[in-house]
Amino acid sequence: MNDPLAPLRTPEGRALLDEVRGTDPARELAVATRLRREHPAELVSAALGQARLRQRAVAKFGDSDARRMFFTPNGVEQSTRASVAAYRARRLTELGVGSVADLCCGIGGDAIAMARAGIRVLAVDRDPLTAAVARANAEVLGLDGLIEVREADVTDVDVASYDAVFVDPARRGGRGRIFDPEAYSPPLSWAVRAAERAPHAALKVAPGIPHDAVPATAEAEWISDGGDVKEAVLWFGTRPGAVRATLLPGPRTLLGRGLPDPEVRPVGRYLYEPDGAVIRAHLVAEVAAELDGGLLDPTIAYITADTARPTPYATAYEITDHLPFNLKKLKALLRERQVGTLTVKKRGSAVEPEELRRKVKPQGPNSATVFLTRVAGAPAMLVGRPVEVG
Protein backbone atom coordinates (compact mmCIF):
# COMPACT_ATOMS: atom_id res chain seq x y z
CA MET A 1 0.00 0.00 0.00
CA ASN A 2 1.25 3.50 -0.80
CA ASP A 3 2.32 5.59 2.16
CA PRO A 4 -0.08 8.57 2.31
CA LEU A 5 2.59 10.59 4.11
CA ALA A 6 5.32 9.86 1.56
CA PRO A 7 5.01 13.22 -0.30
CA LEU A 8 5.51 15.13 2.95
CA ARG A 9 8.59 13.08 3.79
CA THR A 10 10.44 13.86 0.58
CA PRO A 11 13.05 16.66 0.64
CA GLU A 12 10.47 18.95 -1.02
CA GLY A 13 7.80 18.00 1.53
CA ARG A 14 10.12 18.46 4.50
CA ALA A 15 11.20 21.86 3.21
CA LEU A 16 7.56 22.89 2.85
CA LEU A 17 6.76 21.74 6.38
CA ASP A 18 9.62 23.84 7.69
CA GLU A 19 8.48 26.86 5.66
CA VAL A 20 4.86 26.80 6.78
CA ARG A 21 5.60 26.09 10.45
CA GLY A 22 3.76 28.57 12.66
CA THR A 23 1.75 30.11 9.82
CA ASP A 24 -0.87 32.49 11.15
CA PRO A 25 -4.34 31.21 10.16
CA ALA A 26 -5.19 34.68 8.86
CA ARG A 27 -2.27 34.44 6.39
CA GLU A 28 -2.85 30.87 5.29
CA LEU A 29 -4.56 31.74 2.01
CA ALA A 30 -1.83 34.17 0.99
CA VAL A 31 0.89 31.66 1.92
CA ALA A 32 -0.86 28.87 0.01
CA THR A 33 -1.27 31.06 -3.08
CA ARG A 34 2.42 31.93 -3.07
CA LEU A 35 3.65 28.38 -2.50
CA ARG A 36 1.42 26.88 -5.19
CA ARG A 37 3.39 28.77 -7.80
CA GLU A 38 6.35 26.48 -7.12
CA HIS A 39 4.85 23.33 -5.55
CA PRO A 40 1.92 21.00 -6.29
CA ALA A 41 -1.31 22.36 -4.78
CA GLU A 42 -2.05 19.06 -3.05
CA LEU A 43 1.35 19.03 -1.35
CA VAL A 44 0.94 22.63 -0.18
CA SER A 45 -2.48 21.87 1.28
CA ALA A 46 -1.11 18.79 3.05
CA ALA A 47 1.79 20.77 4.53
CA LEU A 48 -0.47 23.56 5.78
CA GLY A 49 -2.84 20.97 7.25
CA GLN A 50 0.01 19.34 9.16
CA ALA A 51 1.20 22.76 10.36
CA ARG A 52 -2.24 23.43 11.86
CA LEU A 53 -2.32 20.02 13.53
CA ARG A 54 1.20 20.42 14.88
CA GLN A 55 0.27 23.73 16.49
CA ARG A 56 -2.71 22.06 18.19
CA ALA A 57 -0.54 19.15 19.31
CA VAL A 58 2.00 21.30 21.17
CA ALA A 59 -0.27 21.34 24.25
CA LYS A 60 -0.11 17.54 24.45
CA PHE A 61 3.32 16.68 23.09
CA GLY A 62 5.43 19.79 23.63
CA ASP A 63 7.00 21.85 20.86
CA SER A 64 10.10 19.68 20.34
CA ASP A 65 8.10 16.55 19.47
CA ALA A 66 5.03 18.19 17.93
CA ARG A 67 7.07 20.06 15.33
CA ARG A 68 8.50 16.74 14.05
CA MET A 69 5.52 14.43 14.38
CA PHE A 70 2.63 13.78 12.01
CA PHE A 71 -1.01 13.94 13.00
CA THR A 72 -4.58 13.38 11.95
CA PRO A 73 -7.41 15.54 13.32
CA ASN A 74 -8.81 12.63 15.36
CA GLY A 75 -5.31 11.68 16.42
CA VAL A 76 -4.66 15.06 18.01
CA GLU A 77 -8.05 15.02 19.71
CA GLN A 78 -7.85 11.50 21.12
CA SER A 79 -4.16 11.07 21.86
CA THR A 80 -2.87 10.94 25.42
CA ARG A 81 -1.02 13.93 26.85
CA ALA A 82 2.69 13.06 26.86
CA SER A 83 3.07 13.57 30.63
CA VAL A 84 0.23 11.12 31.34
CA ALA A 85 1.56 8.56 28.85
CA ALA A 86 5.03 8.81 30.41
CA TYR A 87 3.60 8.23 33.89
CA ARG A 88 1.69 5.17 32.72
CA ALA A 89 4.81 3.83 30.96
CA ARG A 90 6.78 4.18 34.21
CA ARG A 91 4.16 2.15 36.04
CA LEU A 92 4.53 -0.59 33.45
CA THR A 93 8.31 -0.68 33.88
CA GLU A 94 7.86 -0.84 37.67
CA LEU A 95 5.77 -3.96 37.09
CA GLY A 96 8.70 -5.50 35.21
CA VAL A 97 7.08 -5.17 31.80
CA GLY A 98 9.53 -5.32 28.88
CA SER A 99 7.13 -5.72 25.96
CA VAL A 100 3.62 -4.39 25.30
CA ALA A 101 0.98 -4.97 22.66
CA ASP A 102 -0.52 -1.49 22.17
CA LEU A 103 -3.94 -2.17 20.69
CA CYS A 104 -5.75 0.76 19.03
CA CYS A 105 -2.46 2.69 19.03
CA GLY A 106 -3.75 5.75 17.19
CA ILE A 107 -0.96 8.08 16.08
CA GLY A 108 1.43 6.37 18.48
CA GLY A 109 1.58 8.71 21.46
CA ASP A 110 1.43 5.94 24.06
CA ALA A 111 3.78 3.70 22.07
CA ILE A 112 6.30 6.56 21.99
CA ALA A 113 6.15 6.97 25.79
CA MET A 114 6.54 3.24 26.35
CA ALA A 115 9.47 2.98 23.94
CA ARG A 116 11.18 5.89 25.66
CA ALA A 117 10.81 3.94 28.90
CA GLY A 118 12.70 1.07 27.25
CA ILE A 119 9.66 -1.09 26.45
CA ARG A 120 9.40 -2.97 23.15
CA VAL A 121 6.03 -2.17 21.57
CA LEU A 122 3.79 -3.75 18.97
CA ALA A 123 1.49 -0.87 17.93
CA VAL A 124 -1.70 -1.95 16.18
CA ASP A 125 -4.38 0.09 14.42
CA ARG A 126 -6.80 -0.97 11.70
CA ASP A 127 -7.00 2.43 9.97
CA PRO A 128 -4.39 2.63 7.17
CA LEU A 129 -3.71 6.38 7.54
CA THR A 130 -3.49 6.19 11.33
CA ALA A 131 -1.08 3.26 11.16
CA ALA A 132 1.05 5.15 8.62
CA VAL A 133 1.15 8.18 10.92
CA ALA A 134 2.16 6.04 13.91
CA ARG A 135 4.91 4.43 11.84
CA ALA A 136 6.19 7.80 10.66
CA ASN A 137 6.20 9.15 14.22
CA ALA A 138 8.24 6.20 15.47
CA GLU A 139 10.77 6.84 12.72
CA VAL A 140 11.08 10.63 13.03
CA LEU A 141 11.58 10.32 16.80
CA GLY A 142 14.20 7.60 16.38
CA LEU A 143 12.12 4.91 18.12
CA ASP A 144 11.41 2.57 15.20
CA GLY A 145 13.89 0.07 16.65
CA LEU A 146 11.52 -0.45 19.60
CA ILE A 147 8.14 0.15 17.92
CA GLU A 148 6.68 -2.17 15.32
CA VAL A 149 3.52 -0.74 13.75
CA ARG A 150 1.01 -3.17 12.30
CA GLU A 151 -2.13 -2.32 10.33
CA ALA A 152 -4.66 -4.88 11.54
CA ASP A 153 -7.89 -5.44 13.43
CA VAL A 154 -6.87 -5.72 17.07
CA THR A 155 -9.22 -8.66 17.59
CA ASP A 156 -7.13 -10.69 15.13
CA VAL A 157 -3.73 -10.04 16.74
CA ASP A 158 -1.98 -12.73 18.79
CA VAL A 159 -0.55 -11.01 21.88
CA ALA A 160 0.40 -14.12 23.85
CA SER A 161 4.14 -13.43 23.63
CA TYR A 162 3.92 -9.96 25.19
CA ASP A 163 4.37 -9.09 28.87
CA ALA A 164 1.42 -6.73 28.83
CA VAL A 165 -1.50 -5.43 26.80
CA PHE A 166 -2.48 -1.78 26.54
CA VAL A 167 -5.86 -0.95 25.01
CA ASP A 168 -7.12 2.54 24.19
CA PRO A 169 -10.55 1.99 22.61
CA ALA A 170 -12.05 4.68 20.39
CA ARG A 171 -14.46 6.73 22.49
CA ARG A 172 -15.69 9.06 19.79
CA GLY A 173 -18.16 8.38 17.01
CA GLY A 174 -19.89 10.34 14.31
CA ARG A 175 -21.97 12.14 16.94
CA GLY A 176 -19.16 12.98 19.34
CA ARG A 177 -18.14 11.39 22.63
CA ILE A 178 -19.32 7.89 23.46
CA PHE A 179 -20.34 7.42 27.09
CA ASP A 180 -21.45 3.78 27.05
CA PRO A 181 -18.31 1.61 27.53
CA GLU A 182 -19.92 -1.15 25.47
CA ALA A 183 -20.18 1.29 22.55
CA TYR A 184 -16.41 1.84 22.56
CA SER A 185 -14.52 0.40 19.60
CA PRO A 186 -13.64 -2.29 20.56
CA PRO A 187 -16.20 -2.67 23.39
CA LEU A 188 -14.94 -2.56 26.98
CA SER A 189 -16.01 -6.17 27.53
CA TRP A 190 -13.69 -7.33 24.73
CA ALA A 191 -10.83 -5.24 26.12
CA VAL A 192 -11.37 -6.70 29.60
CA ARG A 193 -11.24 -10.26 28.26
CA ALA A 194 -8.01 -9.47 26.43
CA ALA A 195 -6.59 -7.89 29.58
CA GLU A 196 -7.48 -10.80 31.81
CA ARG A 197 -5.57 -13.20 29.54
CA ALA A 198 -2.34 -11.16 29.79
CA PRO A 199 0.15 -11.13 32.70
CA HIS A 200 -0.41 -7.36 32.99
CA ALA A 201 -2.70 -4.94 31.24
CA ALA A 202 -3.85 -1.33 31.22
CA LEU A 203 -7.10 -0.18 29.65
CA LYS A 204 -7.57 3.54 29.07
CA VAL A 205 -11.18 4.59 29.62
CA ALA A 206 -13.11 7.83 29.96
CA PRO A 207 -12.84 9.40 33.44
CA GLY A 208 -16.62 9.41 33.69
CA ILE A 209 -16.82 5.61 33.62
CA PRO A 210 -19.35 4.41 36.23
CA HIS A 211 -17.69 2.68 39.15
CA ASP A 212 -20.05 -0.25 38.77
CA ALA A 213 -18.66 -0.79 35.23
CA VAL A 214 -15.17 -1.47 36.65
CA PRO A 215 -14.58 -5.25 36.73
CA ALA A 216 -13.71 -6.83 40.06
CA THR A 217 -10.44 -8.10 38.56
CA ALA A 218 -9.19 -4.57 37.90
CA GLU A 219 -7.55 -1.77 39.82
CA ALA A 220 -9.07 1.60 38.89
CA GLU A 221 -6.94 4.73 38.68
CA TRP A 222 -8.06 8.27 37.86
CA ILE A 223 -5.33 10.63 36.62
CA SER A 224 -5.26 14.43 36.54
CA ASP A 225 -2.55 16.65 35.12
CA GLY A 226 -2.22 20.21 36.34
CA GLY A 227 -5.62 19.93 38.00
CA ASP A 228 -7.46 18.70 34.89
CA VAL A 229 -8.79 15.14 34.93
CA LYS A 230 -7.42 13.39 31.86
CA GLU A 231 -8.38 9.74 32.02
CA ALA A 232 -9.10 6.63 34.00
CA VAL A 233 -7.04 3.47 33.67
CA LEU A 234 -8.10 -0.06 34.53
CA TRP A 235 -5.03 -2.05 35.59
CA PHE A 236 -4.84 -5.84 35.58
CA GLY A 237 -2.20 -7.94 37.28
CA THR A 238 -1.77 -5.34 40.04
CA ARG A 239 -4.24 -4.97 42.96
CA PRO A 240 -7.75 -6.13 42.03
CA GLY A 241 -10.41 -3.92 43.57
CA ALA A 242 -7.99 -1.12 44.51
CA VAL A 243 -8.91 2.48 43.73
CA ARG A 244 -6.43 5.33 43.41
CA ALA A 245 -6.25 8.95 42.32
CA THR A 246 -2.97 10.17 40.82
CA LEU A 247 -2.07 13.82 40.41
CA LEU A 248 0.54 14.98 37.91
CA PRO A 249 3.08 16.45 37.96
CA GLY A 250 4.51 14.54 40.85
CA PRO A 251 3.16 11.97 40.80
CA ARG A 252 1.12 12.09 44.01
CA THR A 253 -1.08 9.03 44.49
CA LEU A 254 -3.94 8.64 46.96
CA LEU A 255 -5.06 5.08 47.65
CA GLY A 256 -8.61 4.31 48.67
CA ARG A 257 -9.15 2.84 52.13
CA GLY A 258 -12.87 2.21 51.86
CA LEU A 259 -13.78 4.97 54.33
CA PRO A 260 -17.43 5.85 54.96
CA ASP A 261 -18.82 9.15 53.70
CA PRO A 262 -17.65 12.11 55.82
CA GLU A 263 -20.12 13.71 58.21
CA VAL A 264 -21.77 17.01 57.33
CA ARG A 265 -20.44 19.91 59.41
CA PRO A 266 -21.13 23.64 59.77
CA VAL A 267 -19.01 25.90 57.61
CA GLY A 268 -15.55 26.19 59.13
CA ARG A 269 -12.80 28.70 58.54
CA TYR A 270 -11.39 26.77 55.58
CA LEU A 271 -12.87 25.19 52.49
CA TYR A 272 -10.99 22.56 50.50
CA GLU A 273 -11.76 21.83 46.87
CA PRO A 274 -10.57 18.27 46.08
CA ASP A 275 -8.76 17.60 42.83
CA GLY A 276 -11.02 16.25 40.09
CA ALA A 277 -9.24 12.88 40.08
CA VAL A 278 -9.99 12.51 43.80
CA ILE A 279 -13.66 13.25 43.17
CA ARG A 280 -13.91 10.89 40.19
CA ALA A 281 -12.23 8.14 42.22
CA HIS A 282 -14.75 8.67 45.07
CA LEU A 283 -11.90 9.35 47.51
CA VAL A 284 -13.17 12.59 49.06
CA ALA A 285 -13.57 10.75 52.36
CA GLU A 286 -9.86 9.93 52.41
CA VAL A 287 -8.96 13.60 51.96
CA ALA A 288 -11.51 14.73 54.55
CA ALA A 289 -10.02 12.31 57.08
CA GLU A 290 -6.54 13.66 56.36
CA LEU A 291 -7.80 17.21 56.98
CA ASP A 292 -9.99 16.35 59.99
CA GLY A 293 -12.81 17.86 57.96
CA GLY A 294 -16.37 17.20 56.92
CA LEU A 295 -18.74 18.04 54.09
CA LEU A 296 -20.79 21.18 53.59
CA ASP A 297 -23.58 19.04 52.17
CA PRO A 298 -23.91 15.27 51.76
CA THR A 299 -24.12 15.58 47.97
CA ILE A 300 -21.37 18.19 47.38
CA ALA A 301 -17.64 17.45 47.16
CA TYR A 302 -16.48 20.49 49.16
CA ILE A 303 -14.66 19.82 52.44
CA THR A 304 -14.87 22.22 55.37
CA ALA A 305 -12.43 22.34 58.28
CA ASP A 306 -11.41 24.63 61.12
CA THR A 307 -7.66 24.36 60.62
CA ALA A 308 -5.35 24.75 57.63
CA ARG A 309 -3.41 21.62 56.80
CA PRO A 310 -1.22 20.90 53.77
CA THR A 311 -2.49 18.37 51.23
CA PRO A 312 -1.61 17.86 47.56
CA TYR A 313 -5.09 16.47 46.93
CA ALA A 314 -7.15 19.64 47.44
CA THR A 315 -6.90 23.41 47.07
CA ALA A 316 -7.44 25.40 50.27
CA TYR A 317 -9.47 28.60 50.66
CA GLU A 318 -9.99 30.76 53.72
CA ILE A 319 -13.69 31.58 54.02
CA THR A 320 -14.47 35.13 55.12
CA ASP A 321 -18.24 35.20 54.58
CA HIS A 322 -21.11 32.70 54.54
CA LEU A 323 -24.33 34.06 53.02
CA PRO A 324 -27.63 32.53 51.99
CA PHE A 325 -28.03 32.77 48.24
CA ASN A 326 -28.86 36.42 47.53
CA LEU A 327 -27.30 38.31 44.65
CA LYS A 328 -28.09 41.76 46.08
CA LYS A 329 -26.29 40.95 49.32
CA LEU A 330 -23.34 39.52 47.39
CA LYS A 331 -23.16 42.62 45.19
CA ALA A 332 -23.18 44.89 48.25
CA LEU A 333 -20.48 42.81 49.96
CA LEU A 334 -18.22 42.86 46.91
CA ARG A 335 -18.70 46.61 46.50
CA GLU A 336 -17.80 47.14 50.17
CA ARG A 337 -14.67 44.98 49.77
CA GLN A 338 -13.79 46.68 46.44
CA VAL A 339 -13.55 43.36 44.65
CA GLY A 340 -12.92 43.74 40.94
CA THR A 341 -11.40 40.33 40.20
CA LEU A 342 -13.97 37.67 41.04
CA THR A 343 -13.42 33.95 40.62
CA VAL A 344 -16.70 32.02 40.63
CA LYS A 345 -16.85 28.32 41.45
CA LYS A 346 -19.98 26.27 41.69
CA ARG A 347 -21.22 22.86 42.74
CA GLY A 348 -24.90 22.16 43.21
CA SER A 349 -26.00 25.53 41.81
CA ALA A 350 -27.83 26.30 38.56
CA VAL A 351 -26.36 29.81 38.33
CA GLU A 352 -23.68 30.17 35.66
CA PRO A 353 -20.47 32.04 36.65
CA GLU A 354 -20.70 34.52 33.76
CA GLU A 355 -24.32 35.28 34.63
CA LEU A 356 -23.33 36.05 38.23
CA ARG A 357 -20.49 38.33 37.14
CA ARG A 358 -22.81 40.31 34.88
CA LYS A 359 -25.27 40.83 37.71
CA VAL A 360 -22.87 41.77 40.51
CA LYS A 361 -20.57 43.87 38.26
CA PRO A 362 -17.37 43.54 40.34
CA GLN A 363 -15.21 46.66 40.47
CA GLY A 364 -12.13 47.55 42.45
CA PRO A 365 -8.49 46.60 43.09
CA ASN A 366 -9.10 43.52 45.24
CA SER A 367 -9.86 39.88 44.40
CA ALA A 368 -12.05 37.18 45.90
CA THR A 369 -13.49 33.75 45.21
CA VAL A 370 -17.18 32.99 45.60
CA PHE A 371 -18.52 29.45 45.88
CA LEU A 372 -22.10 28.88 44.73
CA THR A 373 -23.14 25.70 46.47
CA ARG A 374 -25.41 24.15 49.08
CA VAL A 375 -24.83 24.05 52.81
CA ALA A 376 -26.85 21.36 54.56
CA GLY A 377 -29.31 21.37 51.65
CA ALA A 378 -29.80 25.16 51.41
CA PRO A 379 -28.45 27.33 48.54
CA ALA A 380 -25.50 29.34 49.82
CA MET A 381 -22.66 31.64 48.83
CA LEU A 382 -19.25 31.36 50.46
CA VAL A 383 -16.74 34.13 49.88
CA GLY A 384 -13.03 33.67 50.48
CA ARG A 385 -9.55 33.58 49.05
CA PRO A 386 -7.04 30.87 48.18
CA VAL A 387 -4.36 30.23 50.76
CA GLU A 388 -1.00 28.48 50.61
CA VAL A 389 -0.72 25.87 53.34
CA GLY A 390 2.92 25.00 53.93
Image (tube, rainbow, N blue to C red):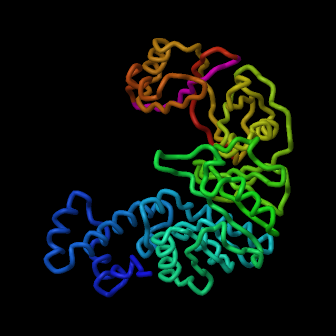
- Is 367 colored magenta in this rendering? yes
Where does residue 64 sit, x and y in percent of width and height? 46, 73
- Is 78 colored magenta in this rendering? no
Judged left or right of residue 16, residue 190 is right
364 or 92, which lies in front?
A: 92
Q: Residue at x 67, y 52 (%)?
A: 232
Q: Which residues are magenta?
A: 365-376
Q: Residue at x 46, y 12 (%)?
A: 328
Tell how many labels: 0
Above-or-below relation of 367 to 117:
above
Magenta highlight: main SS:
strand
Q: Residue at x 74, y 66 (%)?
A: 91
The quarter of the rendered structure image containing the N terminus is bottom left
Q: Is residue 171 visible?
A: yes
381 or 107, which lies in front?
A: 107
Q: Is residue 223 visible?
A: no
Where does residue 132 sit, x and y in percent of width and height? 47, 76
> Quadrant of the rendered structure where residue 83 is?
bottom right
Above-or-below relation of 116 to 214:
below
Where does residue 202 sit, x and y in percent of width and height? 72, 62
201 or 142, which lies in front?
A: 201
